[in-house]
Image (cartoon, rainbow, N blue to C red):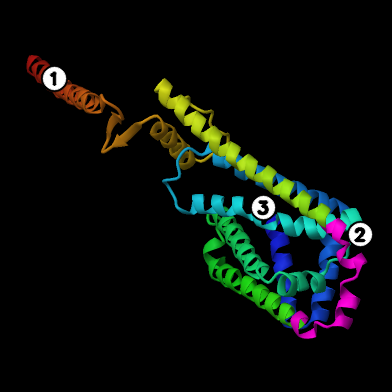
């Protein structure tokens, strides 16, 4: 659902390549759908759950050595809320609390005239959110039967949609800059549309509190990871976690190796080793045990073979 919203938003941005009227028409249908109460409840619930799962994954995952794409997706996902909190509170919460009507003219004026440094911030969050969503979509679809045939078209869309969206954002911004005048500001920057200074200060404080709260949760997850690692090293063992139903064998194996690695246990060339002062000794014990078992097995086969031959001769 979140990726569907992202695609819808990007396609709306792309209408800026046509005209400001096209942007206005697109945002009308965009907001009519996504602010429809059942859809809005489902969307914001999905966003909160998604952010919560990202923080939980930051705590739960012990190692990130298996695939570079997984930590990349996690880092990108955790950075998105930090980058969009101000935009969401300024536009959506401002509308809810004060009835603001911040549409493309007002938002583009903020980015291109009032605070041009936000242009790079907007382009960054568009890129990060899109890459994060595409990674998630790839990890979901790669095992589907149709994916191999659809991959070229999906790749084309993955490149074309954000490119057109960024160009639309640029064209809309240039249009606002070119038409900026006293009359334009009187028409598009009224108190009803952008709010008063006092209202903006309230929204800024809410943004600061929300950002501090989110960063606090991320820091708390990191501290919990550190406390867990210290506790496990002191105990010298790692408790086995229950395996989720439906988890693939490869994922279970990776999780098991994560737990072993966190406890200092490694499997190297078929031998078991434990990190610490006794690593070499334990490695030798395992090797000797393996040789002893092999030696006994060979003798057992030889004795069995000899017994068989004796039985045949006796018969």
Which label number is shown at residue 99?
A: 2
Which label number is shown at residue 308?
A: 1
Residue depicted at 65% across the width and 53% down the height? 82
Few, some or many residues within 10 Å of mark 2 (<14, 14–19, 20+): some
Give 276 or 302, whichever is nearer the viewer.
Answer: 276
Q: Quadrant of residue 196?
A: bottom right
| Magenta span | 176-200
Q: Quadrant of residue 117?
A: bottom right
Q: Please, what secondary structure does the residue beneath circle 2 have?
A: loop
Give 233 or 36, whichever is nearer the viewer.
Answer: 233
Residue depicted at 83% across the width and 52% down the height? 202
Q: Is residue 264 highlighted in magenta? A: no
Is 198 displayed left or right of 287 in the figure?
right
Of the residues tagged 1 and 3, which is closer to the observer?
Answer: 3
Give 61 or 212, whichever is nearer the viewer.
Answer: 212
C-alpha gap between disc 1 and disc 3 = 74 Å
**Where's residue 182, x and y in %?**
86, 81
User: Which residue in the rendered view is the most extreme toward the bottom?
Assistant: 178
Q: Is residue 213 above or below residue 9?
A: above
Q: Is residue 1 visible?
A: no
Q: Please, what secondary structure does the residue beneath circle 3 have?
A: helix
The residue tagged 3 is: 81
- Quadrant housing the N terminus: bottom right
Few, some or many residues within 10 Å of mark 3 (<14, 14–19, 20+): many
Q: Please, what secondary structure does the residue beneath circle 1 have?
A: helix
C-alpha gap between disc 1 and disc 2 = 94 Å
């Amino acid at each position: 659902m979140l990726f569907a919203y992202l695609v819808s938003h990007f396609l709306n941005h792309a209408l800026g390549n046509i005209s400001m009227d096209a942007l206005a028409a697109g945002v009308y249908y965009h907001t009519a759908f996504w602010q429809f109460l059942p859809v809005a409840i489902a969307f914001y619930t999905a966003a909160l759950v998604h952010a919560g799962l990202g923080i939980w994954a930051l705590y739960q995952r012990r190692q990130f050595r298996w695939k570079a794409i997984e930590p990349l997706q996690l880092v990108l996902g955790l950075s998105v809320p930090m980058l969009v909190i101000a935009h969401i509170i300024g536009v959506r919460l401002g509308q809810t609390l004060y009835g603001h009507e911040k549409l493309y003219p007002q938002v583009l004026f903020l980015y291109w005239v009032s605070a041009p440094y936000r242009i790079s911030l907007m382009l960054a969050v568009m890129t990060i959110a899109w890459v994060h969503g595409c990674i998630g979509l790839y990890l979901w679809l790669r095992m589907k039967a149709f994916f191999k045939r659809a991959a070229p078209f999906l790749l084309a869309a993955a490149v074309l949609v954000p490119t057109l969206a960024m160009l639309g954002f640029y064209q809309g911004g240039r249009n606002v800059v070119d038409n900026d005048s006293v009359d334009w500001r009187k028409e598009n920057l009224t108190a009803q549309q952008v709010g008063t200074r006092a209202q903006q200060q309230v929204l800024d404080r809410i943004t600061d509190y929300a950002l501090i709260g989110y960063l606090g949760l991320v820091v708390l997850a990191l501290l919990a990871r550190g406390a867990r690692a210290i506790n496990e090293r002191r105990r010298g063992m790692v408790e086995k976690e229950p395996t989720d139903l439906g988890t693939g064998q490869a994922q279970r194996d990776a999780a098991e190796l994560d737990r072993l690695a966190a406890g200092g246990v490694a499997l190297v060339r078929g031998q078991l080793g434990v990190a610490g002062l006794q690593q070499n000794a334990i490695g030798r014990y395992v090797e000797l045990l393996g040789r002893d078992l092999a030696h006994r097995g060979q003798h057992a086969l030889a004795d069995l073979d000899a017994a068989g031959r004796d039985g045949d001769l006796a018969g």
